[in-house]
Every structure is written in structure tokens, then in C-alpha cells.
Image (cartoon, grey):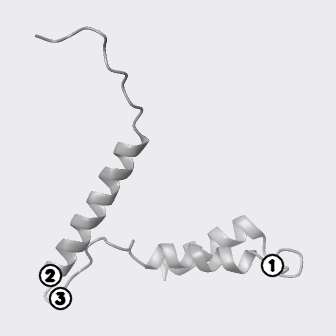
Amino acid sequence: MDSESALVKQISKRYGPVIDLNANPGAMTEIIRLIRSMYVAEPGTPGPGTIGGSVTNADLMKAILKLGRDVRALSAARPTRKPSRTRRR
């Protein structure tokens, strides 16, 4: 119940007590995305796994693949270093 009241407060703070969808048609989409982000885990992150709460091999593989994508993205975003003109011996 606390998360529901916190969600209502957050939406009211952002959009006011009454939401006019004619004036702001994108508000509903933004609210749905906000709710989804609060209640749905990020894709590729291990969840609770099986009933016992253990992590399955599929959960591990998803996490490893996501980590690999993150590392590649960081490598691509890193500025390249110019090679030095001196020779190493």
C-alpha cells in the first residue's frame, strides 16, 4: 500500500491533481512507463529465479550477456588514445 500511495503522490506532483489527456496526450504513456519501471525488473537482470529463490542458469546467462553489452558500450564510449611517436624497446 505504501508503494501505491507513493506512486499517486509522485504522479500528482508531476501532473497535478487532474490530468487533462486532451492537453497532454503523452501523460498516460509517461505514467505507464513510470509504473512499469517501478514494478518490473530491468531486462537481463537476474530475478528471484525459481520458487526457492535460487538463480537459474538462464538468469546467470542473461546477466552475463547484459554485462558483456555494458562493457562493449563503455569501450565504445571511451576516447581513443593516440599512439605515441616514440618506440618502446
The kind of secondary structure element at disc 1 is loop
Q: Is residue 89 left or right of residue 18?
A: left
Above/below status of 88 relative to 23: above
Left or right: 6 as drawn, with respect to 27: left
Q: Amino acid at mark 3?
A: Thr
User: Quick one: quadrant of the C terminus?
Assistant: top left
Tag 3, which secondary structure?
loop
Amino acid under label 2? Thr
Q: CA distance from mark 3 to mark 2?
A: 7 Å
Picture coordinates of residue 87, whole percent (x, y): 20, 10
Q: Is residue 30 visible?
A: yes
Q: Position of residue 17 (x, y in %)?
A: 78, 75
Circle 2/circle 1 CB separation < 8 Å: no
Q: Judge whether residue 55 can be spotted in this image.
A: no
- Which quadrant holds residue 14? bottom right
Report the residue marked by disc 1. 25
Going from the N terminus, do you reach mark 3 or mark 2 first?
3
Q: Residue at x 20, y 83 (%)?
A: 49
Location of residue 20 by image quarter: bottom right
Q: Contact (CB < 8 A) between labels 1 and 3?
A: no
- Compare residues 49 and 67 and report the one nearer the observer: 67
Q: How many marks?
A: 3
Please give the residue where the numbered disc 2 appears in the rendered image.
56
Quickly name the residue at label 3: 50
Q: Say which label, 2 or 1, has the lower sequence index.
A: 1
What is the secondary structure assignment of the residue under circle 2?
loop
10 Å crowding of disc 1: few (<14), some (14-19), many (20+): few
User: What kind of residue is marked 1?
Assistant: Pro
